Image (spheres, helix red, strand yellow):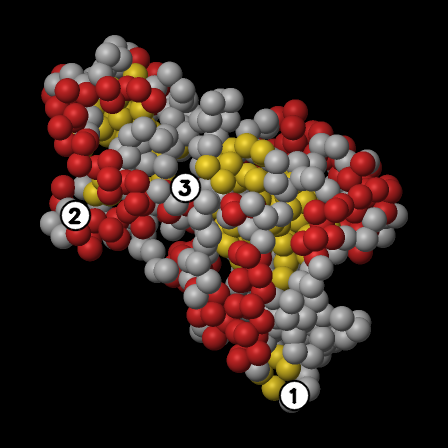
Amino acid sequence: MARFSPRQLAVTIVAASLFDVVAARCSRQAADSSSTCEAGLLSQPPSLLQRRSELHQESSSLDAESETCCSAMGQWPHVKNGVHCSDCTALVLTAPFDGRCDAYCESFGHVCVGAAEDVNDDCAVKWSTRCDWKIRSTSDMLCKCALPASSCSAAAPQQAGASASGQRIQVKGRQILVDGKPIHLKGVAWNPIKKGGTHPSGLNFAEAVERDADLLAKAGVNAVRTYSPITDTKVLDVLWAHGIWVLNSVYNNGRAPSDSVVSKLLTVKHHPAILMWTIGNEWNYNGLYVGMGLWDAASKLQEVASVIKQFDQEHPVACVYGELHSLQEVEAKMPSVDVWGVNAYRGISFGSLFDSYAATSSKPFFLGEYGADAFNTKIGREDQESQAVATKALTQEIVDHSSVKGGVCLGGFVFELADEWWKDDSGSAWEHDKAGHAPGSGPYPDMTFNEEWWGLVDIDRNPRKALLALGEVAIPTAW
């Protein structure tokens, strides 16, 4: 399902995805037709995607309530350039209130029921956040305030975006809850490196994000997983504006000290796009890229996970493992890991993976990597058709086992969005090399890993058929 950027539609902030009582509505400028209104709703962050039917039912009651929700908006303090939005929302200065909408609303006897960053000094929402979270690196913010005695303030005692426990994001059984609702991850691995570049020096999130986020959103993707940390909040802004969560990688190389994660966390942990932190990438195979033994690497990652929890209790820690061998024993040594990612390439089906994981661990898990590359060594050329068949079949299999519907799996991340030309050591980073290796099992149809051909799009961002196939698989909703 295609979604549109909030930059294209002026969407009024009415607490966005961050609370369940007050629903979002289209701006008055964009409400001239039902189709425009629907497009605006679909552009909101991921937690709104599962609520759009509720939004239509609730929006009619908001019109009558808006006039009694707050004091006369002309009397509100610190409003920037006189920008008043509908439903008791205004563009206000951040500096006097340390970037917090709860502090702003309380300053004139109201309570906060919604907070957001604006697009361009207007009422359009770039991204939404909790009332008690600081909106940083900007001079203004959109705050929705209600009188304490009004029906509109019913959600105020529990901060917008928080669950009953006070946390926006929670681990519950085999699920991840956002604002109390289970989420399914229809994800893609994202590591944008141009021709001639290598990892990690050639990585450039900022240059790629606008184009890549649009491609991902049009395929219905709601999450990306990285292999290096995103620390640029502007990159996160763009992803969040397209409804895309981030599983942000903060530790992969065993040479780095455990506390090297701290600066990465503190830079972006308050951004609403952050869903989880990830540590390791099939480290049981690569020894954290320094040849560590299994148990030494496990001990190191347990230490890293513990450090993360000292500085951030709001986001789960996920650890990405290769397949399932010895995972039960490893998990016993790593209690600070909340969620497991599992990289698995088993042809055109995962086979017994879901049942085997259920017997191994009670923690949530997602497919950290899955899919098929676009080069078929059996015929010696690109084979978009086979890649598309595998992508759709595997993604549907993940959906069929979704924890949203009572299954064991949070979702998965197709490997990967775009080709990377640096991966063949025997070739050139300026050329699209065709070498591959066949360990005996692997991707459909040839069981061969052709490392420079994994993209759902090529390196120039021309879509392959697999991207369209991914878009045909819908995100499941809770029963």
Dot in front, 1 or 3? 3
- Say what secondary structure mark 2 lies in: helix
Which residue is denoted by mark 1 in the rendering? 380
Camera-side residue: 335 or 59? Answer: 59
Which residue is denoted by mark 2 in the rendering? 30
Which residue is denoted by mark 3 in the rendering? 47
Assess disc 2: are there few (<14), some (14-19) or many (≥20) residues with their C-alpha within 10 Å of its C-alpha. some
Q: Is residue 14 above or below residue 3?
A: above
Left or right side of 185 for 110: left
Measured in 3D between alpha carbons, the distance from the residue under mark 1 to the one under mark 3, in whole angstroms, is 43 Å
Q: Are marks 2 and 1 in contact (CB under 8 Å)?
A: no
Q: Position of residue 152 (x, y in %)?
A: 25, 22
Sequence-wise first label, 1 or 3: 3
Measured in 3D between alpha carbons, the distance from the residue under mark 2 to the one under mark 1, in whole angstroms, is 51 Å
Q: Is residue 284 above or below residue 276?
A: below
Q: Residue at x 59, y 48 (%)?
A: 407
Q: Is residue 362 above or below residue 376?
A: above
